[in-house]
């Protein structure tokens, strides 16, 4: 056991059994992972199981024990037979209790974990007004059970793989047989094969390993903590990925139009869902373009602003020493700084710091003549609009793309914004997610898919089949 040397929490517990306790055995486990009374329980389980085989009151011998387990296997408390030394190391490191018998070249591995995990609760990042409030946790088996409870069909296939390195993290991916596209599944499995040599700590590791464009600001896969959203993705022909130790579920592939959809859209009436979806689209445009539009209009195209509004802007900017671009850049920097501080601080303090900091800095900037009131309004509206998007990954992409648009608007006005928009559009048309077109549903255009993009048609008109996936 030299490989475990230096581990103070490793327990080697020797005990005897059989006639006159002449046979010796040893239990190997980490006391930080295994229940304290596990060894005694395993000994009683073995005794009960062997007495059932050789008869009550009969002393268990090594030959009988070895014959029974080699011919019948182990059945007590999720036990498995350990065949080699490497498997023994992996079993002990995974939180199992291994029993080794003197005179037998195999061992028994029992599931006896005693690690505290978070209970199923309401999703933190995907709260809804209507719909279920069931969230995933950091336990892989429990998450798979929650999905099985919702999708009661043998077509729901789950395959397990293990990450490489020293972590050997358990990774599971699932799909609905007959619904998922065959070429998509084959390509996904090919990309997943490389994780066997990489250490996996979180679901985002999988995303970075299988995504098509590493340097694209747009997310190519979606995340969810909701089991109902994961099941809906499976019914739509997606592939889901779960990792032991993290509660997020990765939905593959992620298409551009799906980042404006929320699970609550399908729990409300059509008119309400459509109105909210259009509100998100408008929020997307505002979050991406509002600062650059203000810079372009105030710097290059003042003739496009109504006279009364232009006079109000000029009056507000009177005495401001900075050009509109640097003013917007400074305020955006302050806003991003406060948002990041609010995320990193403890939750009860973070929201208070963000709100108070925004009010104090905004008022102080106006009083000091560094920023105009209208610029504070523009930056505040931009930040609020970015919070309206259901997926956090898309909001981060807007935060990144906002600055190139501001620079192009400061250099060439509306013409510069048009050039920047064309580059973004070309990138979106070229982008793929596991080989699927990122703009599927709009480019290439399919009228059937528009029923669940720009507006949400009644549920009875939506076909329960893969609608957005296209063969290459």
Image: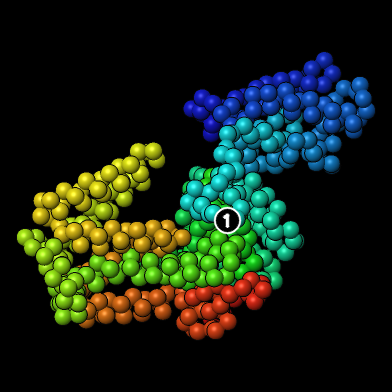
Tell me: 365 left or right of 163.
left
Please report the residue visible at 53 percent of the width from the left and 79 percent of the height from the top: 450
- In this view, the residue farthest toward the front is 308
Residue 196 in view (yes/no) = no
Q: Residue 266, image x and y in percent?
A: 59, 65
Which of the image's four quarters has the N terminus?
Answer: top right
* Badge 1 element: loop
Identified at 25% across, 45% down, the residue is: 357
Q: In this view, does 309 lie above or below 115?
A: below
Instruction: State whether residue 384 appears in this view.
Output: yes
Pointer 1 residue: 130
Where residue 192 sits, quadrant-wise, is: bottom right
Q: How crowded is mark 1: few (under 14 residues within 10 Å), some or many (20 or more)?
A: few
In the image, residue 294 sits, relative to residue 167, either above or below, namely below
Q: In this view of the protein, which residue sits in the foreground, 244 or 445?
A: 445
Quarter where residue 179 is shown: bottom right
Residue ID at (56%, 29%): 32
Q: In this view, does 332 lie to the left or right of 171?
A: left
Q: Where is residue 250 in the image (x, y as percent from the top left)?
A: 53, 58
* Image-based side of 356 in relation to 6, left or right: left
Q: Nearer the viewer, residue 425 or 1?
A: 425
Give the answer, above or below, for where 147 lies relative to 449: above
């Amino acid at each position: 056991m030299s490989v475990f040397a230096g581990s103070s929490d490793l327990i080697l517990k020797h005990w005897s059994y059989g006639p006159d306790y002449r046979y010796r055995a040893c239990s190997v486990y980490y006391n930080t992972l295994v229940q304290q009374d596990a060894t005694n329980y395993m000994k009683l389980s073995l005794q009960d199981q062997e007495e059932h085989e050789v008869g009550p009151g009969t002393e268990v011998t090594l030959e009988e024990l070895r014959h029974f387990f080699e011919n019948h296997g182990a059945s007590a408390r999720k036990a498995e037979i350990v065949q080699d030394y490497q498997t023994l190391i992996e079993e002990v490191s995974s939180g199992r209790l291994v029993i080794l018998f003197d005179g037998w070249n195999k061992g028994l591995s029992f599931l006896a974990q005693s690690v505290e995990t978070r209970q199923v609760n309401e999703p933190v990042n995907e709260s809804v007004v209507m719909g279920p409030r069931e969230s995933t946790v950091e336990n892989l088996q429990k998450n798979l059970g929650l999905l099985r409870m919702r999708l009661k069909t043998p077509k729901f296939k789950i395959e397990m793989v293990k990450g490489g390195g020293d972590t050997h993290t358990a990774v599971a991916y699932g799909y609905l047989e007959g619904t998922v596209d065959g070429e998509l599944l084959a390509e996904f499995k090919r990309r997943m094969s490389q994780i066997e040599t990489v250490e996996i700590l979180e679901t985002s590791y999988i995303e970075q390993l299988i995504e098509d464009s590493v340097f694209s600001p747009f997310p190519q896969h979606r995340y969810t903590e909701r089991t109902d959203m994961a099941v809906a993705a499976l019914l739509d022909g997606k592939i889901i990925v779960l990792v032991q130790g993290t509660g997020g579920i990765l939905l593959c592939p992620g298409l551009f139009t799906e980042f404006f959809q929320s699970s609550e859209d399908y729990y409300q009436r059509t008119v309400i869902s459509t109105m909210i979806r259009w509100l998100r689209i408008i929020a997307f445009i505002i979050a991406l373009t509002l600062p650059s539009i203000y810079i372009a209009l105030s710097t290059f195209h003042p003739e496009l602003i109504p006279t009364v509004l232009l006079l109000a802007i000029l009056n507000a900017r009177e005495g401001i020493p900075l050009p509109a671009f640097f003013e917007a850049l400074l305020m955006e920097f302050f806003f991003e700084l406060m948002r990041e501080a609010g995320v990193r601080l403890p939750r009860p303090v973070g929201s208070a710091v963000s709100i108070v900091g925004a009010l104090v800095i905004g008022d102080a900037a106006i009083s000091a003549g560094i920023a105009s009131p209208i610029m504070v309004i523009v930056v505040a509206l931009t930040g609020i609009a970015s919070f309206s998007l259901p997926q956090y990954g898309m909001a981060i992409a807007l935060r990144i793309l906002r600055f190139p648009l501001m620079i192009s608007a400061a250099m060439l006005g509306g013409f510069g914004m048009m050039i920047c928009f064309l580059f973004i559009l070309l990138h979106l048309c070229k982008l793929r997610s596991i080989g699927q077109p990122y703009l599927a549903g709009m480019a290439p255009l399919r009228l059937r898919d528009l029923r669940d993009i720009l507006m949400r048609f009644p549920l009875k008109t939506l076909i329960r089949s893969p609608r957005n996936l296209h063969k290459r």
